[in-house]
Image: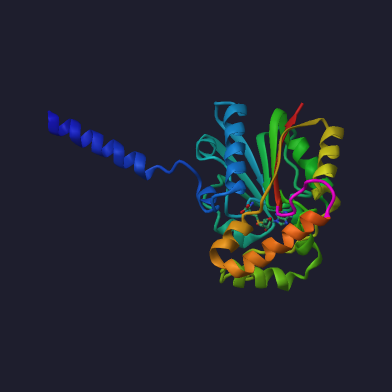
């Protein structure tokens, strides 16, 4: 009897240990503001989404989801992506569609949640994409956007540097050997004006979307660089501190990314 109970506990402990609490995308983030903000996003999604089965649209979902695992587990996930290679390696979507998020249309009010993560900076027509998202989300549903901040140091450098430099950075600073190969990051960036938070906020207000979360946070590239290339990171940190001193206001130019959650009212 005792033995059976012991085995049950052991099995339960093993099951708990092998059931991850967070998606790999979150675990891959270095400790810091990016991870904290994503955890805050997860908490809001947990508190705001219905507890019933969900319909989720990942626009430009590629092969990685940043959604909490308990949300993914009760959802039917549809991914639209323009890159066949990204879709081929996607292992979490129930439906994958090779298409363009700027033009792909779903039946109105189809989804509880639309997520567009690390994508709008790559779009030539962000307004078209946002209009498609507004149309496809249910009343009371959410749109989660994760994007780089064009007004940050990394945003300005990314916007005004050539694509080969992005590939170089990914390969030699981030250590991503596959960077730039077909279907692999970094993807070409355009930085349409609507990627700027103030413009996105104005768009939301004009289109019946309430901004329930907005957070600019230090890009995870900084803690990554500090760990991998401390001398290079110290130089960038020093440059960022000088720019912070020269700029009016209290903005930290290291806040290279943001999360926004919009609710359709
Ligand atoms: C940086 S990846 C992000 C993928 C995933 N959301 C993530 O965070 O890991 C950008 C993705 O957007 C996709 N993409 C870029 N432009 C697109 C478009 N017009 N329509 C659909 N997908 C697009 C790319 O193929 C790529 O998978």
Above or below residue 258? Residue 167 is below
- Viewer-closest of 250 and 41: 250
Q: Where is residue 44 in the image (x, y as percent from the top left)?
A: 61, 32
Q: Position of residue 43 (x, y in %)?
A: 58, 33
Residue 95 colored magenta?
A: no
Q: Main secondary structure of the magenta part?
A: loop
Quarter location, residue 75:
top right
The quarter of the picture where the C terminus appears is: top right
Residue 251 colored magenta?
A: yes
Above or below residue 158? Residue 52 is above
* Quadrant location, ligand no. 1: bottom right
Report the residue at 40% width, 42% height from top. 19
Report the residue at 75% width, 47% height from top. 104
Q: Position of residue 210 (x, y in %)?
A: 77, 30
Above or below residue 253? Residue 185 is below
The quarter of the picture where the N terminus appears is: top left
Query: In this picture, which residue range is highlighted in magenta?
Result: 247-254
Above or below residue 36? Residue 210 is above
Report the residue at 83% width, 42% height from top. 198
19 left or right of 127 in image: left
Report the residue at 81% width, 48% height from top. 196
Q: Position of residue 52 (x, y in %)?
A: 55, 26
């Amino acid at each position: 009897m005792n033995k059976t109970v012991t085995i049950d506990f052991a099995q339960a402990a093993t099951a708990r240990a092998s059931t991850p609490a967070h998606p790999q995308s979150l675990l891959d983030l270095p400790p810091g503001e990016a991870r904290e903000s994503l955890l805050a996003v997860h908490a809001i999604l947990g508190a705001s989404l219905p507890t019933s089965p969900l319909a989720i649209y990942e626009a430009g979902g590629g092969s990685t989801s940043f959604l909490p695992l308990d949300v993914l587990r009760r959802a039917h996930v549809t991914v639209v992506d323009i890159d066949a290679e990204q879709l081929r390696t996607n292992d979490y979507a129930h439906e994958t569609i090779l298409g363009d998020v700027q033009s792909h249309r779903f039946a109105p009010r189809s989804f509880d949640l639309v997520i567009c993560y690390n994508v709008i900076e790559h779009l030539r027509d962000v307004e078209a994409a946002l209009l498609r998202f507004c149309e496809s989300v249910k009343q009371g549903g959410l749109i989660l956007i994760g994007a780089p901040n064009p007004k940050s140091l990394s945003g300005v450098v990314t916007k005004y540097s050539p694509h080969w430099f992005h590939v170089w950075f990914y390969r030699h600073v981030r250590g991503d050997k596959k960077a730039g190969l077909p279907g692999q990051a970094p993807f070409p960036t355009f930085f349409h004006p609507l990627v700027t938070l103030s413009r996105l906020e104005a768009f939301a207000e004009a289109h019946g979307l309430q901004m329930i979360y907005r957070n600019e946070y230090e890009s995870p590239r900084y803690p990554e660089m500090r760990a991998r290339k401390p001398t290079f990171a110290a130089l960038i940190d020093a440059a960022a501190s000088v720019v912070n001193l020269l700029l009016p206001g209290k903005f930290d130019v290291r806040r290279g990314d943001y999360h926004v959650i919009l609710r359709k009212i």
